[in-house]
Image: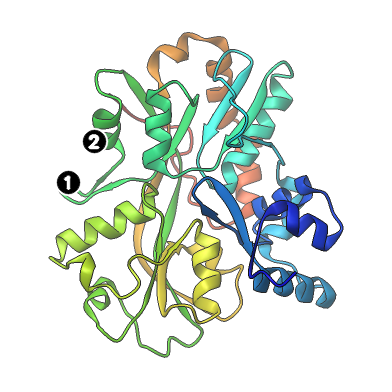
């Protein structure tokens, strides 16, 4: 195949594996992918790198945790799944949500857990439109310097919601190994000699960046690469490592999975789950809260590393 951008089916044919296995590799962070519209695409260069890594016997930290991961069902653009008492749809991209989905299915065998890999903003909109059961969020409000609460009030107007902490993460810049451009912090967004790798509209990272640009009075038109988008933390880090840009924003945990990357910590973020309060009268959702607060669930997250779990399961706010 001469194409530099392949579909999951084309990747499956190339590697002589099933399409579902391709999705598993993407979910585990072993194969970077991005979206064009609603369709997944994988760069041929990333496939070549994956093959080389397998030959060397190299695995990322996420691969080492494969026994702890869940490979859950993914909602595709051609299949409509409804959120109801038989289907729990969880919006968000963090690996923790995969583990939560598996625990839900293990504890409640009659329930099917689905994952919708979309950003925080769109996840809340899906929750409002009854297309999701639970939405994860890490949306920073630049005016209040608070996470999630104001966004939940605005995107689910008039709907009582309960915001529950899942973890805290560190956001920062991915830079090339050795930090050759001497990137130190947010003020470097003003530099004209740097190229940036952005995230898609609607994700928490994009909202954080845009908020910082407002706070620093920087026009997005001045950011070289502002319109260069990737669809995950991993894809951004990989792009920086391959020289497609000088820096990009993402979580610290992913920086440990990619060679030729250093991490510049910038901000501690709160990563929450949002559930409609009325749903908490349902025994299914009460059991989900029990799972989140269980020692077994928290122990699995400790095993992953890179997460601050001091408030996991704590109700942060009721809107």
Q: Position of residue 206 (x, y in %)?
A: 34, 55
Which label was assigned to residue 150?
A: 2
- Observer-nearest of 4 and 105: 4
Q: Relative to residue 239, is residue 276 drawn left or right?
A: left
Q: Which residue is mark 1?
A: 144
Q: Quadrant of residue 16?
A: bottom right
Q: Is residue 153 left or right of residue 95?
A: left
Number of callouts: 2
Res 4 quadrant in image: bottom right
The answer to whether residue 315 of the structure is visible from this angle is: no
Distance from Cα at disc 1 to Cα at disc 2: 9 Å
Q: Nearer the viewer, residue 154 or 275?
A: 154
Which type of secondary structure does the marked residue at label 1 adopt?
A: loop
Q: Would residue 284 be visible to someone looking at this image?
A: yes
Residue sitting at x 66%, y 70%: 46
Residue that extends furthest to the bottom in the rendered view of this protein? 180
Callouts 1 and 2 close, C-beta under 8 Å: yes
Q: Is residue 280 above or below residue 136?
A: above
Q: Look at the picture and state if 16 lies above or below 279.
A: below
Give the mark nearer the N terminus: 1 vs 2. 1
Q: Residue 215 in the image: x percent, y percent?
A: 15, 60
Give the residue at the far front of this rendering: 2
Query: SS at mark 2?
Result: helix
Q: Quadrant of the N terminus?
A: bottom right
Percent position of residue 144, x then y: 17, 46
Residue at horizontal 85 percent and vertical 54 percent from the top: 17
Mark on residue 114? none
The residue sitting at 32% across, 67% down in the picture is 226
Residue 293 shown left or right of residue 136 in the figure: right
């Amino acid at each position: 195949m001469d194409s530099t951008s392949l579909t999951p089916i084309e990747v499956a044919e190339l590697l002589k594996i099933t399409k579902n296995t391709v999705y598993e590799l993407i979910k585990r962070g072993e194969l970077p992918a991005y979206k064009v519209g609603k369709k997944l695409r994988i760069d041929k260069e990333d496939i070549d790198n994956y093959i080389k890594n397998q030959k060397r016997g190299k695995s990322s930290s996420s691969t080492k945790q494969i026994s702890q991961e869940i490979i859950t069902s993914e909602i595709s653009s051609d299949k409509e799944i409804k959120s109801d008492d038989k289907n729990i749809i969880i919006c968000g991209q963090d690996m923790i949500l995969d583990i939560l989905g598996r625990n839900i299915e293990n504890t409640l065998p009659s329930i099917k857990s689905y994952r919708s890999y979309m950003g925080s903003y769109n996840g809340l909109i899906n929750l409002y439109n009854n297309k999701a059961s639970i939405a994860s969020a890490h949306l920073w409000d630049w005016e209040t310097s608070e996470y999630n609460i104001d966004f939940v009030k605005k995107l689910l107007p008039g709907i009582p919601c309960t915001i529950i902490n899942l973890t805290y993460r560190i956001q920062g810049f991915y830079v090339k190994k050795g930090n050759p451009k001497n990137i130190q912090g947010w003020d470097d967004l003003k530099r004209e000699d740097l190229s940036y790798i952005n995230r898609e509209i609607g994700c928490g990272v994009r909202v954080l960046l845009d908020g910082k640009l407002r706070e620093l009075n920087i026009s997005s038109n001045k950011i070289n690469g502002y319109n260069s988008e990737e669809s995950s933390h991993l894809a951004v880090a990989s792009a920086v490592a391959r020289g497609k840009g000088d820096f990009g924003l993402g979580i610290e945990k992913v920086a440990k999975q990619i060679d030729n990357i250093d991490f510049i910590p910038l901000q501690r973020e709160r990563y929450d789950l949002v559930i409609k309060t009325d749903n908490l009268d349902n025994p299914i959702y009460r059991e989900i809260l029990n799972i989140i607060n269980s020692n077994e669930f928290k122990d699995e997250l400790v095993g992953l590393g890179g997460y601050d779990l001091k408030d996991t399961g704590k109700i942060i706010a009721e809107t």
